[in-house]
Amino acid sequence: MADLQMIIETVKSLESVELLETLTEKRIRVKIKKGMLHRLCECLLRLGFDHCSCISAVDYIDHFTLVYSFWSTKGKIGLDAYVDLGREEHVPSISGYYGGANWHEREAFDMMGIVFDGHPNLRRILLSEDVTYFPLRKGFRMQDDSEGEPTTPKEGT
Amino acid sequence: MAEMWINLGPQHPMTHGLWDLRVKVDGETIIDAEPKIGYLHRCHEKIYESRTYPQIVPLSDRLCYGSSMSWSYTYVHTVEELMRIDIPEKAEYIRVMMLEIQRIASHLMWLAAYAGDLGIYSMLLYPMRERELFQDLLQSVTGNRLLYNYMRIGGVRNDLPDGFGNYLLKVLDWFEERMDEYEEMLDESEIFRMRTRGIGILSGEKAVNLGVTGPTLRGSGVCVDLRKDDPYSIYDELEFSICVEDGCDCWARYRVRVREMRESCRILRQVVSRMPENGEILSKKVPRNPPKGEIFVRTEDPRGEAGMYLVSDGTNRPYRIKIKSPMFVNMSALPEMLRGYKVADVPAICGSIDVCMGETDR
């Protein structure tokens, strides 16, 4: 099984992959360009990262960041890959490599409006089909209960 | 025969929360399935962004009423990891004790519901009776039966009541005897065997690729348990084994959960004997706000790998919290398990992954 040092070397050797930090002996962070996502997945599967724990989308107002958390069930090492996206940019889907990514990507689309190219079934998952807004974007405001008015969704800035 | 889609839900006899399973059938055989979720979506992640860190603890309890202690632990553990603070030893012991009691209570509730779904009604009754003992234990510590609000960032809210250790040991003695009875009742029940053996096959390789975790994954012969693989709290000091079954079917998932309850009893006995007499239960060095940064932390929930991804901007409210629910992912693997079986197998297969809609929809 690949050890941490070898994983770091292999991942670094991919072009436009930047090692951010080694958090602990068990978890490393890398930053990659979205075009490299499929190459990274192929490389990670070879290195034994067979489990995609989570895909988190964060809205930083001027851009989105997607965080892919991988885990190697045999090597017991985790890897977080950060991908920055422009507001309107699409990103390639990785559900062909990791079946578990399927619903995480649908959720990111549902809540943040990020489009995953090549996803087999990119539809809303938690909200109903006729909803037009993306509620986890920072511009979307909930009226605070303390104002004494019913909470109604509003599309803000 | 003509193929058609049937909606099983959102209200149905095996409902554990509201969800809709659409199955495509050819006669009695399922050729495809599609779970539809979202009926219990309560905007947890959005609400968290407008609450201060301590205010989120009781909210995180409400992710799943069957394992609220684990969820609030996952939350406080995430914040503590970002703050990089040390937790007093006694608090860690109390936490692990609570987590394991919660695991047993959650598995018992599953066992009762599952056996009930499959028509063994006496087993609907007995695990519920024993679960009540564990709920009483939790109630005597936290004052509440289901939603505890007990974890705090940096420790726990209050100390254990007097004589709690002995009370717990008595319950464990009683419970372990009852466990033998359950196994006799279910393992030797012809109906139960016929309805679970060889049903809902999910191979280990597929399970890992589909992101399945927890007892469902261990039932597929994959030896993964975050308490061992990525130890948190005091789990690395305790002796217990990972329960793995390689049947890949509903029966294997049932066996994993029953054996896990025994392991939890083993952990609880160790914790009782090692529990420090005195000591702080809440760290005094908890900063008001976590530093700027981000972290992804996972724990082993009764249902699988529970995780939270926290982004802090240094203020008193989180910038973003993403909740990784084990059920959300396990649910997405259901079509894989259902394909090829009969409509009558649906309750056996869906029940075997321990559905909890609260945390799936968040």
Image (cartoon, coloured by chain):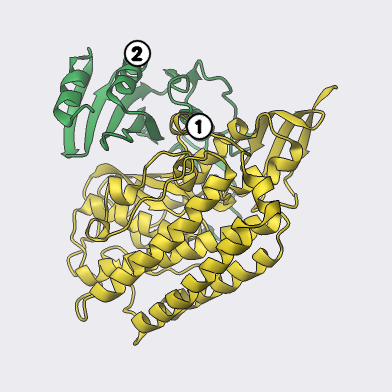
Mark 2 — on which chain does it sit? A
Q: Given the image, on which type of amino acid does mark 1 rest?
A: Ser
Nearer to us of marks 1 and 2 is 1
Circle 2: is it few (<14), some (14-19), or many (20+) Cα within 10 Å? few
Residue, disc 1 = B203
Residue B311 horizontal/vertical position (percent): 31, 43
Residue that appears at 39% across and 70% down:
B150
| Display colour for chain B | yellow
Q: Which chain is green?
A: A
**Left or right, B72 with reference to B312:** right
Viewer-proximal residue among B80 and B12: B12
Q: Quadrant of the N terminus of chain B?
A: top right
- Seen in the picture, residue B79 relative to B311 is either above or below; the reply is below
Q: Is residue A80 among the parts visible in the rendering?
A: yes
- Seen in the picture, residue B19 relative to A100 is either above or below; the reply is below
Residue B148 horizontal/vertical position (percent): 45, 69
Q: Marks 2 and 1: in contact by CB < 8 Å?
A: no
Q: Is residue B60 among the parts visible in the rendering?
A: no
Residue that appears at 37% across and 54% down:
B74
**Left or right, B320 with reference to B80:** right
